[in-house]
Structures are given as C-alpha cells and as structure tokens.
Amino acid sequence: MKKIALLGILLVLCACRARTMRQDVAEPVYDAPEVAQTYAIPEEDLYRYDISVKAMGDDYVVYEYADVRIDKVATLASAFCFETNPGKKAYLRDIYMHKNRRRRATFDCVDLATQ
C-alpha cells in the first residue's frame, strides 16, 4: 500500500513539473498589442500559452499549438481571414507535429464558391 501511495505522489509531481516546463517555453499568440487590436480578437480567446502565430501572409496563416482542439485554432484562423480577406473563409491545408512536440496547422484564406 505504501508503494502505491508513493507512486501516486511521484506521478502527481511529474505531471505538475511537465505542465510548468511547457508554459516556460510557450510564446504569446500576438506579441505586439497593435496586431491584436488589428484583428480584434478578445484577450480570453488568445490561449496565451497554447497557441502562437508562426507565419502570416496575405492569404495564409500558420499556428503552432498544444493542448488545444483544432476547432479553437480554426476560430482564430477564421477571424484572420475575415479581417484580411473579406469574403474568404479559412481552409485547413495541413497539420503536422513539430520538433518541439507541438502541432502546426496551416490555414489558407480561400473563396470556396469559386473553386
């Protein structure tokens, strides 16, 4: 019984340590406040320690994320496409696991009615 209790305590400590390590290396979604104001995304939707923008163009955006469902990331991509390309929707091009064990998703802003 003592072994099981010690093993449980050890697992809880390891889980807490892993969570704090992940937060130390995360980047905010939008580094500059003027970018966050440009795209009018509320502060509570930024998931500051879980989603970050890695690349941004006129018709695409790349997000890196961890511990977040893809539909939350898609909401941010949809807002990006709405602000930069009116009339176009966010279309998921690909998702892959990056070397730091976080996922990267690429969204294209396309008009699906003309495709």
Image: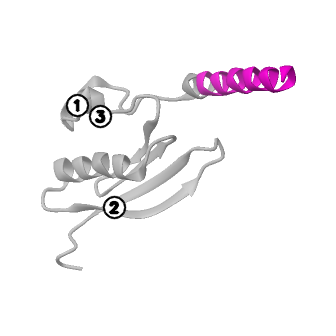
What element does badge 2 sit on?
A: strand
Q: Residue at x 18, y 78 (%)?
A: 114
Badge 3 is on which residue?
45
Determine which residue is flagged by label 1. 42
For the point 66% across and 27% down, the residue is: 15
- Residue 22 vs residue 5, the one in the foreground: 5
Q: Amino acid at mark 3?
A: Asp
Q: Nearer the viewer, mark 1 or mark 2?
A: 1
Decide: is 68 above or below 115.
Answer: above
CA–CA distance between discs 1 and 2? 22 Å
**Which mark identifies residue 108?**
2
Q: Disc 2 or 3, which lies upstream in sequence?
A: 3
- Disc 2 crowd, CA 10 A, few/some/many (<14, 14-19, 20+): many
The image shows residue 41 at horizontal and vertical percentages of 23, 35
Which secondary structure lies at badge 1? loop
Q: Classify residue 9 by image quadrant.
A: top right
Q: Which residues are magenta?
A: 1-20
- Asked if the magenta segment contains residue 19, the reply would be yes
